[in-house]
Amino acid sequence: MSFELSEEHREFRRSVRDFAEAEIAPHAAEWDRKHYFPVETVQKMGRLGLFGLTAPEQYGGSGGDFTSLCVAIEEISRVDQSMGITLEAAVGLGINPILTYGTDEQKQQWLPDLVAGRKLAGFGLTEPESGSDAGATKTRAVLDGDEWVIDGSKQFITNSGSSITSVVTVTARTGEKPDGRPEISTIIVPAGTPGFVAEAQYDKLGWHASDTHPLSFAGCRVPKENLLGERGKGFGQFLATLDDGRVAIGAVALGCLKACLEMSVQYAGERKTFGVPIGQKQGVAFQISDLKVMADAAELLVYRAAALKDAGASVQEFRQAASVAKLYATESAVTATRIATQVFGGYGFMEEYPVTRFYRDAKILEIGEGTSEVQRMLIARGLGLPVE
C-alpha cells in the first residue's frame, strides 16, 4: 500500500494552504491574545467545503476520503492549532457520530447546516471524574414517557458553547447491563434546550481561539427519538469515534511539527551570532535536523493510518495504526515546540513570535482524544500483552 498523496490531494493541499495563509495566519496572534473565537472565519472554512469533506453529497458534502480531511486539518493547524482543532472536532466529534449512527430524520435535521459550516456540533464525553475511564460516566438519562431526562455534567467540550453551536451529543448512563456494568447510550441535545447550559468558557493554557466549555444538565428533557444509534451502544460508538479522532489529532500535531521546522530553518538562516548565521553551528543545525526526521516520520504514520481507514482496514488494524500515529505525532510535536523555542533563544519567549503560541498550544495534543498513556495501553493490547 502506498501512502503517497495523490495529485488531487496535493492540489487540495495547495488550496487549503492558500486559504490558511490568507484568512487565518494574519489574525491568529490577535485571536489568541483576545481569546476570540472567529465565527466568520469558521463559516468561511465551511464555504470552502472543509466541514463536508467526508459527508455524502445528499447532505451538502463532497463525499471525499478521510485522507483529505487530514490534509485540511494539517494545513489549518500549520498556521493555527485553534482553528485546526475546531475543524477536527466539528467533523470528527460533531458530524461523524450523527452521520454514522443517526437515523435518516436525524441526519436530515442536523447535517446540512453542520456540513456547510453554518453551525457546529460538540461531543460530550469527558466528565469531572471520567475521561480515560469513560465507563465511570455519571451523567444519567432516564426515559420518562416520550422524553429522556438528563442530569449530570461534562467538561472540556469543544465547539459546545459558541454562537453557532446547534447541538451536542452526550454519553449518559441509561440503565444497567445484566452483568452489572453501566449501560451507556448517546443522546442528541439541541443547544438552547431548557436545563442544558454551556458554562463560562475555560481560561486555557493554549488553544485560546477555540471554543471550549463545561456543560451542565439539570432535568434537561429531549424527545426519546433523540437517542443516537441503539440504546446501550454508546460505549462502542465513542470508541470508534475516538479512533478516527486520534488520527485527526495526529494531523493537528503534524501541522505543528511542520510549522516548527519551517520557522526554525528560516530563523536559523537569518539570525547571526559571532558574525555568522546560527544555522552554521552544529548545535543548532543538528536540532533542526531532528525536527525534519520527526516531521517526516509523523507524516508517514498519520497518512498510513488515514490510508488504512480509506481502504476499509479491520477495526483492530486501524485502531493500532491510529494509536501509533497519535502517540508519535503528538509527543513529537511537543518536543518540536521546545526545540524551536530553543532555536529562537530569548525571542522564543516573546509573544510577538508565533513559536511561543505553538509552544503553549502543543501540550494538549498529548492529552486530548486519549492521553499518551492510553495510547501506549492500546498499542500494548494490540500486541497481545495482558496490560490492564
Image (cartoon, rainbow, N blue to C red):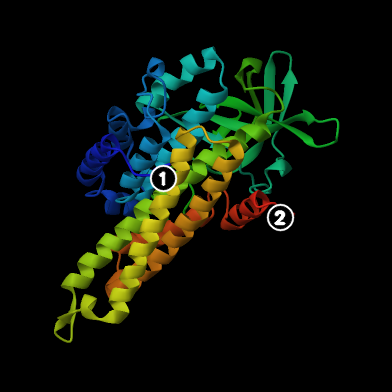
- Amino acid marked by disc 1: Tyr
* Mark 1 and mark 2: Cα distance apart in space: 26 Å
- Dividing the picture into quarters, in which one does residue 52 lie? top left
Q: Is the Cβ of the residue at disc 1 closer than 8 Å to that at disc 2?
A: no
- Dividing the picture into quarters, in which one does residue 152 lie? top right
In this view, 98 is above or below 31: above
Whether residue 159 is visible: no
Looking at this view, is 377 or 335 the one in front?
377
Marker disc for residue 303? 1
Q: Is residue 20 left or right of residue 35?
A: left
Looking at this view, is 74 or 113 the one in front?
74
- Dividing the picture into quarters, in which one does residue 114 lie? top left
Marker disc for residue 173? none
Whether residue 110 is visible: yes
Looking at this view, is 222 or 265 the one in front?
265
Q: Secondary structure at mark 1?
A: helix
Q: Residue at x 34, y 73 (%)?
A: 287
- Amino acid marked by disc 2: Leu
Name the image quarter holding the C terminus.
bottom right
Crowding at dot 2, Cα within 10 Å, few <14 / some 14-19 / many 20+, comes out as few
Marker disc for residue 385? 2
